[in-house]
Image (cartoon, rainbow, N blue to C red):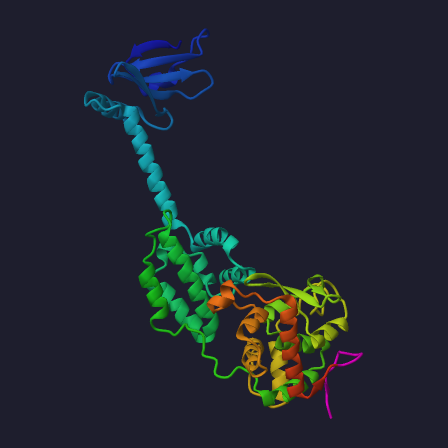
Amino acid sequence: MAKSIKRRLTLAGIERFTLPDDRNEVVVWDTVAHHLGVRHRRGRTPAFIFTAKFAGRTVRLSLGSVSAITLEQARKETARLNALLAQGIDPREQRHRQKEDEEARREERLRREARLEVLWEEYLNERKPKWSKWTIRDHLAAAKTGGVLHPLMRTPISDLTPQRVGDLFRKEAARRKTTAGRAFRLLRACLNWADDSEHWAGLVDVRRVLKAASAHIDLSPPARVGDVLQTDQLEPWFRGLAAIGHPVIEAYLAILLLTGRRPSEIRTLTWSAVDLRWRTMKIEGKRGNEILPLPPWVLRRLETMPRNGRFIFTTTGKSPIASPARAHQRALDAVGLPHLTLHGLRRTYGTLAELVPIPAGAVAQLQGHAPSALVERHYRRRSLDSLREWASKYERWILNQAGLVQPEEDGRHLEVVQ
C-alpha cells in the first residue's frame, strides 16, 4: 500500500520530493483542496489524483501529470469534482459521458473532413460483388487521373457544394458529353447510397448537388441517328475493312458484326474461351458467363488467326488491342460511308436480324440482352444447337448481302464475288 502524507501542496515541494528508499509509491495529499493528492512513483512522473468516497465506494481519478497541468488547474478540477459529489453525481460517469461526447465530436469531425475518395472506395467495396466487371471498370475509370470525377476525389464530402459540382459537370459536358453523363449517373448512385447509410447521411445536400450538375447541361447520351449499317452498305463496309491492311483489326471488326456482341467482350476474348473443336466461345457478359456458337465464317477466321499470347486480338502478345475506332473510321472514309461507332456494329446485328428473319428472343440471347417478354424470361431458353442454327443463318444472310464467300484456306482477307 502506498504511504500517505498530508501537507499544503506547492510546486517547489512537489519538485523537491524524493521517495524513501523503502517505498516505491507515496501519495501527498493537499490540505487546501480536499481529495486532491500527488502520487509519486519510482521511475515515473508525479501525477495529480482525485480520491473520494461515493455511495460507499472509492472513486479514483487521474487528473494528469504535474508536467501536463498546473497545481492551480488541479485544484480547480478537484473543486468541480467535489461539487459533483455534493450533487449526488458520480464523477466517473460524468467523465465517461464527456469522453463519449468527445469521441462523438471527433468522429463527426473526421466524417466531415473525409474526402470523396474515402466514400467512393467504401461504396465500391460494398457494391462490387453485385456488379459486372464492366461496371467496376467504369467506376474506376471515372475516379482515376483524367476521369471526370477525379477533380472531386480529394474534396471533403461536406464541401461538395452545388456550385463546385455544377461547375465541374458544366465543363466536362462541354468536351466529353457522353462520358460526363455516365460519370454523373455513377456519382448520383454513390451519393444516394451514402445518404441512405447511417455513417454518411446528411453530409451533403444530395438533391441540390445533383440538380446543379444536371439542370443547366444535357447529360443524357446523344441520340443515335442512324449508327447502323443498311443492307446496301454491307458490301462497301467489308471492302473498307480489307483496305485497312491489318488482319487482326479486320477480323475483330468483322466478328463484331457477325456476332453482335459488345466490342469489349470480343476485344478481350482469349484462346482459352474458344473451343474450335466444338465450335463454341465463352463470353463473360453482363449477365454472367455465356456459351455461344461460332458460326462457320467466324470459326474459319479464328482457325487461321495466329496464336500470339493468351488474347486472340492482340499485336503485342501481352494485352488485347486498343479500341480500333480510328482504323474503323479510316475504313469508312475510304469507301465513303458515314460515321459508324463500334457499338453501331452491335446495333446493326439487332436491326438486320429482323430482315433474316430471326426470332427476337434468339437475337437477345445471342447478343447477351436480358429477355424482355414473359415467356422468354421464364420459360424459353434456347439450346446451343438452336442458337447455332440462327447464328449461322444470320451469318449466311450478311455474307450473301455483302457479296462475300467464306475463304477455303486463307481466311485472312475477305474476297468479293465477281
The relative height of residue 244 versus residue 187 in the rendered view (above or below) is below
Task: Mark yes or no: residue 324 visible.
Answer: no
Tell me the quadrant of the picture where the N terminus can be found. Answer: top left
Tell me the quadrant of the picture where the C terminus can be found. Answer: bottom right
Task: Mark yes or no: residue 277 visible.
Answer: yes
What number of labels is visible? Answer: 0
Residue most extreme to the top: 22
The relative height of residue 293 versus residue 337 in the rendered view (above or below) is above
- How far across and down, in percent of the image, does residue 280 sit? 69, 66
Q: Is residue 352 left or right of residue 32?
A: right
Magenta-tinted stretch: 407-418
The relative height of residue 307 versus residue 414 in the rendered view (above or below) is above
Principal SS element in the magenta part?
loop
| In magenta segment, residue 311 | no
* Closer to us: 333 or 80: 333
Q: Is residue 26 left or right of residue 82?
A: right
- How far across and down, in percent of the image, does residue 108 sit? 35, 45
Q: Is residue 259 left or right of residue 53?
A: right
